[in-house]
Image (spheres, rainbow, N blue to C red):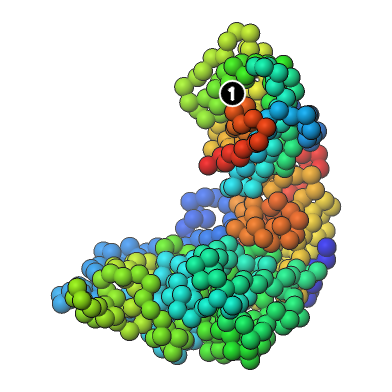
Amino acid sequence: MSMDLRELYQDIILDHGRHPRNFHGMPAATNFAHGHNPLCGDKVTVYLKLEGDRIADVSFEGRGCAISTASASLMTEILKGKTLAQAEALFKGFHAKVTGGDPVEPPPELADDAERLEPLTGVRTYPARVKCATLAWHAFEAAAKSGALGVSVKTE
Amino acid sequence: MTVVSPFRPAANAGFDVRRIRRDFPIFERNPGLIFLDTAASAQKPKPVIDGVAEFYRTDYANVHRGVYRLSSASTDQFEKARETARRFLNAAHADEIVFVRGTTEAINLVAHSWGGKFLEPGDEVILSELEHHSNIVPWQLLRDRIGFRIRAVPIDATGGLDLAAFERLLSPRTKLVAVTHISNVNGHVVPVETMIELAHARGAKVLLDGAQAAPRFPVDVRALDVDFYVFSGHKAYGPSGIGVLYGKKDLLVEMPPWQGGGSMISSVSFERTSYLEPPHRFEAGTPDISGAIGLGYALDYIEGLGREAIREHEDALTGYALRELSALPGVNVIGGGQRQLGVISFTIEGIHPHDVGQVLDQNNVAVRAGHHCAQPLMDRLGVAGTTRASFGVYNDESDVDALVAAIRAAQELFGA
């Protein structure tokens, strides 16, 4: 309650929540996965086009709150062009930040990208909302491992 | 969407909310709290909180066991609570009152015991689109074992139960109609009187989920002639973990036990065990003794305020809230049929219910956001979730005004 709501809903989040980027299906996807938060009913599908170890394209579809939509949107912007290893490192750092775990510093070349995720870390003081911020990332992680058949993950 | 609700004066003069609020310590400890989530669980008045503590201090022992005085005192209080629950529902006999953990357990008990014995392949159980998951899933679990069919009465364009459709669903195959008395999503007061008559004319039994109704208006199981009536203590200003299953005596005596253990047997050997008569047959193990006693205090508290008075108060408040919310641009109130009481769901254009809930919380307004354990209804309404405001005896117009102000704040933040 002490935290101002504007720290949770920063302009960048409101913007991406309202106008999500890369918000579409992907017929040429090599991988995809559904993410579902059974607690609130939020659903997201993350599509990947992998070229070897590199994320050539990434998009998402679904419905969710401003936090989960903005998180998915920012994630797709950041992950485009990254390698899977870089993506994994970014997720680890982000996950630690929003869950209040031991800090995981991303490699220096990813520092700017990690910085872009900073506005989402306001959820750490709202435990009920942490899963909103991580849903798309969990779906991404599952998609990376899934192959073309697709898989489902739940955030519980 | 317009909602039909007769205009009434906004306040019930005889119902002193300010005084009532002083009975609930939560408001003293949380100054400024606007609590609009009674449909999820009600706050507790002092007679319940203090009564339970006093019972532990003075009379506590296990029930139906000891020959010592303390155990009889505890048993007396426990059985007195059963009598209070009987009176609360106007049941004919205290033996028709089974203490359970809550509405969910009560429905599972009926499904497991009555349903397990009397339902067969080819039979039909009629539910409705308004049901809480707790009145859907137990029947599905049983269906998967037995193989009967589940039908769901649809809602009509106003959000109320479609009575004509219900009549069409009824058939000689219908063995049970299990519906809510008041929807936990849109507050619709289901026309159960007519439904019970129609169902009985076809020889079907009727179970009513009274979780939302029992704390909001008088319920007379004999006047209704309902076969099973279930409700939870915690939504009726009592403790959580306790609830009531009312069943007609001639039905309960035909039902097998559903859980085995102590307290429910008359004799046990390795060859053969015989069971007690209802209600004890269905109360295996040490019950929630203090919970039942606390529930008794809660029901006394409700009776003390007067259930007609509570109905009038919540009716006026519901009408006021519907008018205020419907007048807000960008707010869509989910229709609650011809009669609606105590519960209102709405969506706000461009803002997800969880974001609404977050902003409302920041404004000290506690509401529920999400699917309300009623996903089939959400699908029917074509929404992922709603924001829900629900009322209790401690709410008044100022709470609705605070809700409206908080909604405006949310709209401003999200530019919706």
| Residue B110 shows in the view | no
Name the quadrant containing residue B152: bottom right
Protein chain holding label 1: A
Specify whether B1 is left or right of B65: right
- Residue at the outermost top position: A108
Residue B1 x %, y %: 83, 63
Residue at 55 percent of width and 22 percent of height:
A92
Determine crowd level at label 1: few under 14, some 14-19, many 20+ residues with C-alpha closer than 10 A. many
Residue at 23 percent of width and 68 percent of height:
B61
Vertical position of residue A114 compared to residue B370: above or below = above
Tag 1: amino acid: Phe
Residue at 79 percent of width and 64 percent of height:
B323
User: A136 or B38, which lies in front?
Assistant: A136
Residue at 70 percent of width and 42 percent of height:
A64
Name the quadrant containing residue A131: top right
Residue B103 x %, y %: 49, 68
If the image is split into quadrants, where does the C terminus of chain B sit? top right
How many numbered marks, from 0 up? 1
Vertical position of residue B143 compared to residue B274: above or below = above
| Residue B255 shows in the view | yes
- Residue at the outermost left position: B68
Specify whether B277 is left or right of B273: right
Label 1 sits on residue: A91
Vertical position of residue B310 compared to residue B101: above or below = below
Specify whether B270 is left or right of A117: left
Residue A106 x %, y %: 57, 14
SS for callout 1: helix
Residue B65 x %, y %: 20, 74
